[in-house]
Amino acid sequence: MSKGPNTRLAELFELTGWSKGELARTVNRHAAAMGHLQLATDTSRVRRWIDLGETPRDPVPRVLASLFTERLGRVVTIEDLGFGRSGPTARRQPVDGLPWAPDQTAAVLTEFTGMDLMLNRRGLVGAGAALAAGSALHTSLNDWLRTAPAPRTAVRPATASPAVFDHDELPPVGSQEIEALEKSVEVFRAWDASRGGGLQRKAVVGQLNEVGGMLAVQHPPHLQRRLWGVAANLAVLAGWMSHDVGLEPTAQKYFVLAAHAAREGGDRPRAGEALSRAARQMVHLGRPGDALDLMRLARSGAGEGVLPRTQAMLHTVEAWAQASMGQGQAMRRTLGEAEELFASDRGDVPPPHWMQSFDEADLHGMQALAFRTLAEHDPSAATTAEHHAKRALELRGKGYQRSQIFDYISLASACFIADDPEQADRYARLALVSIRENSSHRTWDRLREMYRLTAQYAGFPKIESLREEIEHVLPKAPAKPPAGAVKSPGSLKV
């Protein structure tokens, strides 16, 4: 009995530009290169996969995922192709494949990072599908996040082959190995805060791929929890670094992976923080409504035991989304609650290491960003944005160069909105001093927003000079793809 067309596979197949016969021949060649010499598919089989919803046997789904990843220049997983990991295509959910079934998180994590690394090695763009809507993620994950994970009894997932994990015999993992992994997270985090995510993203993804392989087997519970914690931290970093260089759908997938890993490790506050990153991504991309949906998910998923400082951070993200929608009263109320929560943190309970970077400087930096954003709707908010940006700069410690650039850009933008071009020019030039040494595309995006504000002062010689310098610093727009090139998808789900 036909299950109906596999629409996900059909959408991706259309983007490749292949015929069904070409896909069949390419599958056979690619499978042989992967060591599956016995595989022989044909046009009629491809037609049944697409038109009738048949699910091919292993290793065909993995071969197809690798092929589509290479062809489209972005990570394509088995779930993206509409194939379940253990038989028929799963029933559609608000976001297909979420949440993953128990014991599959390690397999999905390792597959996704492996495909991401393949794109790095081959120099592909890695653009991607459209982001999943915040409301869809909320519907898919809300109830799941609020329940405890089922006990894991399996060792290596039965559906994951050695080719996926690239481990014939996994080395023993003890407390010393996990401690070394935890220290590596801190090194990567410090580099990201200073220089942006572009230069170390591949290293983080590679480390996460290794950890996924370690999680494919069972360890003593105390080690297993720590290993899931490492996976969550690395996935957040991989997501943040991907967002930092404009790989938005890839970033969102890593944030969702981080939430899964944190929940597996019993750390619901970490899961909430990971999803708040996805919300910040949405505000940056001009989708504040989706961000508010994700913040509802982040706050409900974080559970009851969230420390006041973590709650304060979540409030600042929500406030930025409200500011983007021009909701000044709601934004001020949310930021007031954030200030109260931050002040109530007596420090008697040490914050988790992933929250230690959210200090008073970050609180003021987020407040500056929220008021500067609101000033687009209500120019009177610019003065308050200036105050918080200056305070953030006073408090910034060494090693947070990217945040310092953001503070200067917020301050200069607020000055332009407040009709103070002299001060705006001063702070804008301070931002430009170090922006060339940073690989963060987000700093360029914020710089473009500030550049737009300079237009009304284009007749001022000093501002004309500033505009020329900004134009010189900003990277040129990417060249248009040649005629006949495969187009990036624009409407597919994560």
Image (cartoon, rainbow, N blue to C red):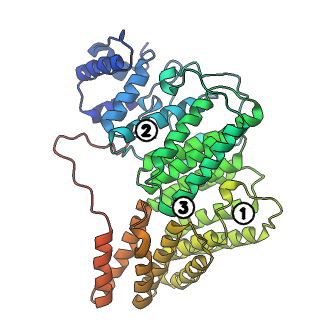
Judging by the rendered image, the residue that carries numbered circle 3 is 193
In this rendering, the count of numbered labels is 3
Q: Is residue 14 above or below residue 44?
A: below
Judging by the rendered image, the residue that carries numbered circle 2 is 117
Distance in Å between CA atoms under marks 1 and 2:
35 Å
Q: In the picture provided, is 488 more to the left or to the right than 380?
A: left
Q: What residue type is labelled 3?
A: Ala
Q: Which of marks 1 and 2 is nearer the N terminus?
A: 2
Q: Could you tell me which secondary element the residue under label 1 belongs to?
A: helix
Distance in Å between CA atoms under marks 1 and 3:
19 Å
Q: In this view, does 374 lie above or below 14?
A: below
Residue 400 visible somewhere in the drawing? yes
* Mark in the foreground, 1 or 3: 3
How far across and down, in percent of the image, does residue 323 sit? 53, 70
The answer to which image quadrant residue 394 occupies is: bottom right
Q: Earlier in the sequence, mark 3 or mark 2?
A: 2
Q: Which of marks 1 and 3 is nearer the N terminus?
A: 3
